[in-house]
Amino acid sequence: MFSRKTTRPERVQTMANRSNDPGFSVLGADLVLRGALHAEADLHVDGTIEGDVVCKSLVQGEGSTITGSISAQSVRLAGTVEGPVEAAHVVILRSATLRGDVRYDALTVEQGAHVEGHFARRDGAGSPGLALIG
């Protein structure tokens, strides 16, 4: 009638391996986060963040808003950002509005993107890492 469930060793091992791989996190469109966000994982944001963001990789949805600094290895912006951005690879899509300075190694800006700020390569070099997409 009553049975005791036992955990299979394979499942425990799989879960342990997953904890070493930070994976991917999503902030949904209905969420508002007030405060700094630090993630070891790749991050997809469709909601609103009022604070600084530090993560491995950031993908921002069109309807999202980030008010604060962004620091990541790669950043793909499609929504509204008010604050500085620093990343090795930065892509600013045509739907994006960015009010803040950008420090980058490689930069792509689609035609139609709204940007108010300064661009500077992190190594201090000229503009070979810049690509404008029409």
Image (cartoon, helix red, strand yellow):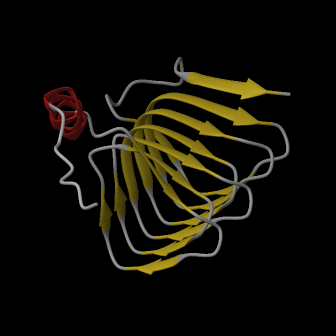
Measuring from the top left, give residue 56's x and y in whole percent.
34, 40
Corner quadrant of residue 76 = top right
Q: Determine the residue positioned at 13% across, 30% down.
A: 9
Measuring from the top left, give residue 97's x and y in whole percent.
71, 59
Whether 103 is drawn above or below 121: the answer is below
In this rendering, position of residue 118 left or right of residue 36: right
Q: Determine the residue positioned at 56% across, 75% down.
A: 31
Q: Nearer the viewer, residue 68 or 65?
A: 65
Corner quadrant of residue 133 = top right
In this rendering, position of residue 103 left or right of residue 110: left
Residue, far front: 1
Number of marks in the image? 0
Q: Determine the residue positioned at 18% across, 34% down.
A: 8
Rendered-image quadrant of the N terminus:
bottom left
Q: Determine the residue positioned at 48% across, 66% down.
A: 83
Measuring from the top left, give residue 6's x and y in whole percent.
16, 44
Rendered-image quadrant of the C terminus:
top right
Q: Nearer the viewer, residue 95 or 8?
A: 8
Residue, far top: 128
Corner quadrant of residue 112 = top right
Measuring from the top left, give residue 74's x and y in whole percent.
45, 35
In this rendering, position of residue 111 left or right of residue 20: right
